[in-house]
Image (cartoon, coloured by chain):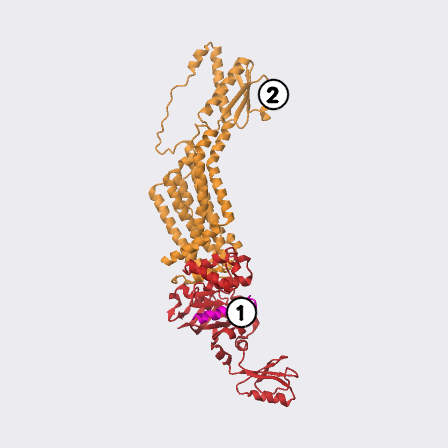
Amino acid sequence: MSLVIADLRKRFGEVRALDGVSFSIPSGTVFGFLGGNGAGKTTTMRIMLDILRADSGSVTWNGVASTELPRRTWGYLPEERGLYPRMTVLEQLLYFASLYRVPADRARRDVDAWLERFRIPQHRDRRVEELSKGNQQKIQFLAAILHDPDVLVMDEPFSGLDPVNAAMLRAAFLEMRDRGKTLVFSTHELATVEELCDAVAIVDRGRVVAHGATREVRRMRGRRVVRLGVTGDPALPWLSIPDALVRRPGRDATEIDVGAAVDPSEILGQALAHGETVTRFETADPTLEQVFIDLVGHDPAAEERTLASLATPAEG
Amino acid sequence: MRSSVHTAFLVARREYRVRVLNRTFAVMSGCAALLGVVLVLLPIVLMSLAHQATTRIAVAAPTPALAAEAASEIGARLSAATAVGTPGATAGTFVVTVGDAASAAANVRAGRLDGALDLARDASGELQFRYVGRGDAGSLQVALVRQAAAGLAVEDRLGRAGFDPAGRASLFAPPAFAFATADADASGSVEDQVSRGLVGFGLNIVIYLAIITYGYWIASSVAEEKGSRVMELLVSAATPDELLVGKVAGAGAAALTQYAALLAGGAVGLLLQGRVSDALVGPSAAATPVASVSLGVLLAFGAYFALGFALYAGLYAAAGAMVGRQQDASQVGMPITMLATVGYMASTFGGSTPDAGWMTALSVIPFSSPSTMLTRLVAGHVTLPEVAASLGLLAAGVVAAFWLAARIYRAAVLQYGQPASLRRLLFAGRSPVAVDRPAA
């Protein structure tokens, strides 16, 4: 039981949007799909949903090609928020539910339940254009899930949400996962990915550069992070261990990126030897953000040029 | 297939509701209904206004008896023209005798009189006539006064030659005269031809306005959906083809609803036509334009309306998909509007020559046939095979237009950023956007 993306390739004119994208997502998991702007995330998602056709490659869900799957298998929350501004919340949600063949009475019941859960039942009969951006986003999320899809694909679901609404959405994700649903989403909020995702894939320029369980991806470079808090200079000018690099000096603790061969206790020994009072010492896996920057942190100017050339369909 | 039809129906139903439940739509439909009443009753009102006019003529002559005789003759001629419904004749005639011809002429120039006739005798005793009137020498009024003058001159000569009044009257009694047409293709009286022309013009306007008004609706609506990005949600729930067909059907149904209001108004006008005509013009009023509409013409109108609307609506939808902003929809739809205008203008200018070769050709070309064939059909110059061929080609044109529109729609509907060229969209390759997923 899994979603398998195999060797997807897609060009838009001269631009190669996807260049052999492959990964798999076990069912009943939350999956983070990461990448810089223009890396190919949105294009991959659209191909997964079969609203865009790949030049080659395949997408299968439980062994069935996506081209053969019923539309209601999928729920989709696009990156660009869009609803009918002059329709009421209820009318709008019932309309989208009807396109997925959800009986009207069931849809109406579910709309009421979700609006209660998202603390916006008072907006049920208001026009969408009268709602705040965050509330519109919640409505769009409901439009994507009212038909109870097996796989929910979301492009930047947290962008524009305040912390309270983001927490509400995270709780909804986990509840859906617990009901056996598979959730795939892209985001630039890597802390959220670490909190929610069982597995991730990182794409860069149309290629998958990392894929696997979130913990494995964090460890894939074979390096670790040492966090050291001292009362002296947080830049640790006395540190002289090869392959131990000060990454982020901080008042509370300084992050040191260390290679697999480095024994963290050596760093502690050097600190004490230089008369530092140690207030904090811990070792951890690198954050996903660190791994992401290491893997896709290429020249920003070159990225801008790529974005300009991708002004047409391949936005993700 | 069945589920696709259902999805298209759901899309159409939303489109229809959004359109019809709009306040502007209700106001416009009310105006359309009123327009229907006005359009049907307007010819009667105009006729009544013409009939209510009175011609006022002053006659001056060397003797009061001659002036009275001339006034009587002119009055009789003008009244006779009114009685037989001569085009241009007025309902009332008011002829008076005056002593001063110069003063009467001044009154004509001042607009207080319609004409002033001055009679005089030359040295040989012959009557001479000088008429000051409005308009040109060929107007009905001048012609009637001229006839009256000729009659007066002959009677005067006969009187001076010694004929008694009774003998003169029998001499000028009109002979019995009957007329029968030998032309098998005669399309009726002048009134009938004018009436047919009006009907053809009216039906053409109905189709043309529906195409450009509601076609723009469709283009604008597609552009709005694309611009608001709701399209991304839609294409994950329905195929582009279902969306295209649903949108065209929904907007078409809304258009028909508004036209139903227009026709309902027209029907009310028809019901009132007899009474209004009797009240304003009198029972002798000529046949109204609507009398020229036969069941066949109505059926043909329905077919050309539906197919013509579908043809253009598909193209407008594709045009709307090519732009990302609602305000750009009219600009991108301009070539399609011009195409529809060509057909409309051709039928307007070709209405007087429905058998011309170019009209025949345009009446089988799908883009112009809804207008031009209807014009020819109303004129009664078309055979059934011609109509069948025209409708067949138009139906094929609708299929081709939807195929083309679907191709553009699929390629353009998720395309943002710089607008893509038509060429790029048409040759974007095999189904850039998926079209054949199962629905549920």
Q: Residue B234's spot in the image, x, y percent?
A: 45, 60
Q: Nearer the viewer, mark 1 or mark 2?
A: 1
Q: Report the front residue among A53 and B39.
A: B39
Residues in magenta, as a range: A158-182
Q: Is residue A49 magenta?
A: no
- Chain in red? A
Task: Tell me which amino acid carries mark 2.
Answer: Ser
- Chain ID at mark 2: B
Q: Residue B59's spot in the image, x, y percent?
A: 55, 19
Q: Is residue A166 magenta?
A: yes
Q: Secondary structure at mark 1?
A: helix
Question: Main SS of the magenta segment?
Answer: helix
Q: Please report contact status of discs 1 and 2: CB closer than 8 Å, yes or no.
A: no
Q: Which residue is mark 2?
A: B103
Q: Which residue is mark 1?
A: A167
Q: Report the front residue among A303 and B287.
A: B287
Q: Residue B74's spot in the image, x, y percent?
A: 50, 20
- Chain in orange? B
- Chain ID at mark 1: A
* Rendered position, B318 above or below A70: above
* Rendered position, B282 above or below B216: above
Q: Residue B138's spot in the image, x, y percent?
A: 50, 27
User: How many numbered callouts?
Assistant: 2
